[in-house]
Image (cartoon, rainbow, N blue to C red):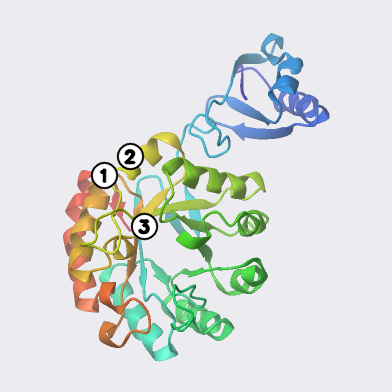
């Protein structure tokens, strides 16, 4: 339920209503705006009705949130959420590019890649220390050593860093080293992990599952927000379809749908979305054109030697070319490349 207060309502009026909401065993929300104070109440609809807040002298209107995801819904928050990634603003009119290798392999590899992507215009560094792989015999990542390398390189280059967390037991270590958690497609509905990340206040980049609908992604985000962490960034990374020409089918239809349904920012990962480096740049431009808030791109100094996803990783020169060609599309979409 959304409760819009009248312009003359004071903080004391709002606090009194929030106390009534909490006394009913419901979750109260305080969302001050520039023109109106908006309150929220989450819980049993029957209890919400018993409050009869529509008759309160300081209440202008009471509206039900029809979407099953309440906190994520644009009904609950009309303006776009902007997530602070260690000083980098993700969302709003910003178009943010985060780039780096699929996996942290060595300090030399990470530093070379980080310097290259920063020089080309990326403002964030990605790299996996823990790698959930389809095959148990594939490279699984360097673990905590990889986290230390990632943090060291991020500090040396002055960029925030993003890395994947694969289980609850790793949350504490990843939180210590990374600027943001990344939840991979395979873990999108790992609800214990989502709840644990919700108890942090560190940003979470939540990737869409390989067979997940948009509503599934938004409900997964709701788990994180419901635990108190509002700093969620969604990521479209392609879904599995009957098409075999590419690794996945990058569902750019989802971007305007997501933007219409939620206030959370959304990135696009054209590397996983296509699985083929030659297709990454055109799909990156398409992502900007359809309203995405940024990109998550795989870049490696020597993709031919990569221990993970070399086929879809760009060479530094290709990434530089991508960034040069991206700006007109970003500007046409009303955003600023930063």
Q: Residues within 10 Å of mark 2 (few under 14, many from 20)?
A: few
> Which is closer to the viewer, label 2 or label 3?
3
Q: Position of residue 163 (x, y in %)?
A: 49, 70
Tell me, yes or no, whether the two marked residues, 1 and 2, touch with CB atoms within 8 Å. yes
Q: CA distance from mark 1 to mark 3?
A: 15 Å
> In the drawing, does residue 274 fall left or right of residue 194?
left
The residue under label 1 is 290
Q: Position of residue 302 (x, y in %)?
A: 28, 86
**Residue in the image at 60% along x and 26% along y:** 37
Specify the quadrant that holds the N terminus: top right
The residue under label 3 is 237
Q: Position of residue 132 (x, y in %)?
A: 49, 72
Specify the quadrant that holds the C terminus: bottom left
Residue 109 visible from this viewpoint: yes
Outermost residue on the right side: it is 23
The residue under label 2 is 256
Q: Is residue 89 above or below residue 297?
A: above
Q: Earlier in the sequence, mark 2 or mark 3?
A: 3
Q: Is residue 320 above or below residue 152?
A: above
Q: Nearer the viewer, residue 289 or 253?
A: 253
């Amino acid at each position: 339920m959304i409760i819009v207060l009248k312009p003359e309502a004071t903080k004391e009026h709002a606090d009194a209503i929030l106390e009534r909401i909490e006394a009913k065993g419901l979750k109260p929300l305080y969302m001050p705006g520039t023109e109106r104070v908006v309150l929220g109440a989450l819980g049993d609809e029957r209890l919400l009705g018993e409050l009869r807040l529509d008759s309160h002298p300081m209440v202008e209107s009471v509206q039900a949130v029809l979407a099953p995801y309440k906190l994520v819904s644009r009904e609950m928050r009309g303006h776009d959420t902007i997530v602070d990634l260690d000083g980098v603003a993700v969302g709003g009119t910003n178009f943010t590019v985060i780039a780096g290798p699929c996996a942290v392999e060595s300090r030399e590899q990470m530093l070379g890649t980080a310097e290259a992507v920063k020089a080309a215009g990326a403002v964030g560094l990605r790299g996996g220390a823990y790698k959930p792989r389809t095959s148990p015999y594939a490279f699984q990542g360097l673990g905590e050593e990889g986290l230390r390398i990632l943090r060291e390189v991020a500090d040396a280059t002055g960029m925030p860093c993003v890395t994947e967390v694969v289980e609850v037991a790793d949350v504490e270590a990843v939180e210590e080293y990374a600027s943001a958690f990344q939840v991979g497609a395979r873990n999108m509905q790992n609800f214990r992990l989502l709840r644990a990340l919700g108890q942090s206040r560190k940003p979470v980049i939540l990737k869409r599952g390989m067979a997940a609908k948009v509503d599934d992604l938004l409900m997964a985000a709701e788990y994180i927000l419901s635990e108190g962490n509002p700093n969620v960034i969604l990521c479209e990374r392609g879904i599995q379809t009957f098409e075999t020409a590419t690794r996945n089918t990058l569902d750019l239809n989802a971007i305007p749908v997501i933007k219409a349904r939620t206030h959370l920012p959304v990135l696009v990962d054209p590397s996983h979305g296509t699985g083929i480096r030659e297709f990454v740049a055109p799909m990156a431009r398409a992502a900007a054109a359809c309203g995405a808030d940024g990109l998550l791109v795989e870049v490696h100094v020597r993709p031919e030697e990569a221990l993970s996803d070399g086929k879809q990783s760009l060479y530094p020169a290709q990434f530089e070319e991508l960034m040069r060609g991206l700006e007109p599309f970003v500007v046409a979409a009303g955003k600023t490349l930063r």
